[in-house]
Image: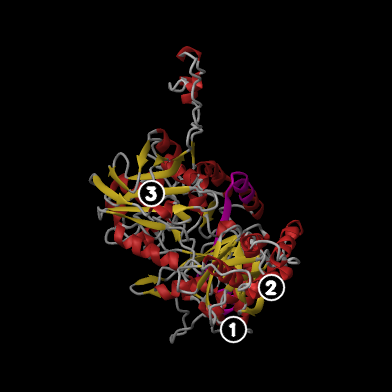
Amino acid sequence: MTGRFPIEDVSPVVSCGRYPAKAVVGEAVPVSARAYREGHDALGCNVVWLGPDGRARPFTRMRPGEPGQDRWHATIRPDAVGAWTFAVEAFQDPYLTWQNAVTKKVAAGQGAAELANDLAEGARVLTAAVGLVPAGDADRVTAAVAALRDERLELPRRVAPALELADLLWAHPVRELVTTGEEHRLWVDRPRALFSAWYEFFPRSEGAVPATADAPARSGTFVTAMDRLPGVAAMGFDVLYLPPIHPIGRVNRKGRNNTLTAGPDDVGSPWAIGAAEGGHDALHPDLGTPADFRDFVAAAAEQGLEVAMDLALQCAPDHPWVTEHPEWFTTRADGSIAYAENPPKQYQDIYPLNFDNDPEGIRAEILRVVLHWVGEGIRIFRVDNPHTKPFDFWHWLIWEVKRVDPDVLFLAEAFTRPAIMHGLGKIGFTQSYTYFTWRTSPAQMREYCAELVASVDHMRPNFWPNTPDILHETLQHGGPPMFKIRAVLAALLSPSWGMYAGYELFEHTARPGAEEYLDNEKFELRPRDWAGAQEQGRSLAPFVATLNRVRRDNPALHRLRNLVFHDIDNPALLCWSKRDPETGNTVVVVCSFDSQAVQWGNTTLDMPALGLDWHERFTVYDELTGASYDWGQHNAVRLDPYLQPAHVFTVRRPVPPPPVRPAAPDLTVRDVPADLSGGTAPAAAADKDDARWTS
């Protein structure tokens, strides 16, 4: 810091500035700082911010926060992907100092003679302002200077033109004794880094034919998997995540349900990467050729789906790296290579890399692999177990990749200790899996989401109700209503959410004693009758499509910073809202956590958080049912798990009707035009979209 005034506690800053804070293009990023000065003269603050092109963005004045706290606030809205910088400046504001003094002295009855020095000071400040304001306003400032110096005018008329410049000189202030704070970094991603809806499926299951007594199993391919793309797109997803699509090892291959002995028809786990056909830069030959993969990616794009690939830095025992670079692995005392373990779990079909052996060689090879797939059109990677690899490696890899293509995004699949999950976000991971699955009460969810909101500058959550590895007991035993409940919570609490194929079919049978699916698709082909389930009404797909449509149509749901919880007197219910200040779009959700019984509750809404005064009434429109209700601060709700376990309301405020012109005394009722008669609107008009209601 250089200059007169202290500037402290700047936000957003991650780890004292060691890492850049996060934002996305178009996001309103709050900037705040504590700044103060000696004495009673006025202080002003502003943000100086520069884009990736090095060009300064518009002057952004900061406003004071709660009185007496010396906290200053502003909002910036980055408009390009890349590395941004910002700094807070504090300055002496002579106009505000003058305005405060003159207003008080005039109100106290002091005359022109007593204010002679103040009038001269005002003229000096405004003379300096002439060159700072827009050209079209310069004449106003010049006229105010002239009035201050005109001794023929009465005092109120001398000062009035200068006092009327308050708004203009707030936006274009005279700044003296400018102090510039430290420069801070902000990395800005494309919008999908914050707002996205993910769907996971195994291409080998789409179009697969299970083994029979007369024929071996036949894997699905990229070509057959294309048939599933319209169904995924119809549910409103925009990211299609594929588990590993590389050759699968044959040595120590696991059988169905993770058994140690594989049969001749067992396809193995895709996470056991590598075989004679190649490693991480190769495709499983059963899925198709590189040309087939490119066609699949293009077909997905035509459906509005961006393909995300799995980046699992581990090897099957027959991966080419094992023979070409045995030094990249850990050798045990008996000379064997150590396989992966997470006691009591054992992964005999996977060798983890040892990043302390030839780190330069490993780094160079992995960077080559990632950039290979970037060259094939992949811009999103879901990273398997990043917390088991060195953090300095990830920091290096992510920013090396972004240096080549800043649009590349990384999702961390790290179910581990909170500090590690937050640390991965700080070093560059774009999004993170979370503990959402294990937050099963409203109190737990509220507390956890508050933690995530507080961490939004470095960690972006992605909520998944299920994965191939995780089938929580709430879904095992909660019935179809729980599938709806968890989908509502995931889709509407977090800007990014995802689900694994089969969720929409209510798949819920677990392997005994485990929190994972029986007949797990990780180890076998699982073709599903999507069309039949839809025709028979056994699919959650229409409900999921509605949730994703609501997400897409309401900009308030595209952000995390704006999440606000509201009180409700039933501990089985959770009430929250999100509001977009720019558009006024506001969504209020009330969701039950009980999949068995009807629950009632009474809300106490934080009305200012909805953009409303405490006394106001407003209309809420339920996006799930089409019903409308008149609401205020206190409202009763009833949620039936089988009929409607959640309300998803958009807030609509009535537009006052135009004033009614009084009829002339000599007119009879039949002479009065229809719109003045006080009658109801014609039925045809009532059937149209009601223009009296706006979001």
Q: Quadrant of residue 257?
A: bottom left
Task: Answer above or below: position of 322 versus 639.
Answer: below
Residue sitting at x 76%, y 67%: 131
Disc 1 from disc 3: Cα separation: 52 Å
Q: Which mark is residue 589?
A: 3
Residue bearing mark 1: 358
How many neighbours does mark 2 have within 10 angstroms: few (below 14), some (14-19), or many (20 or more)?
A: few
Look at the image and say whether residue 303 sits in the magenta stretch: yes
**Whether residue 278 can be seen here:** no
Q: Position of residue 378 (x, y in %)?
A: 62, 58
In the image, 606 versus 238, the foreground residue is 606
Horizontally, residue 273 falls left or right of residue 593, namely right
**In the visual, does 686 lie left or right of 604?**
right
Q: Earlier in the sequence, mark 1 or mark 3?
A: 1
The residue at which mark 2 appears reads as: 120
Mark 3: few/some/many CA within 10 Å (<14, 14-19, 20+) = many
Name the spot of residue 614 as percent of width and height, x first. 37, 51
Element type at mark 2 = helix
Q: Secondary structure at mark 3?
A: strand
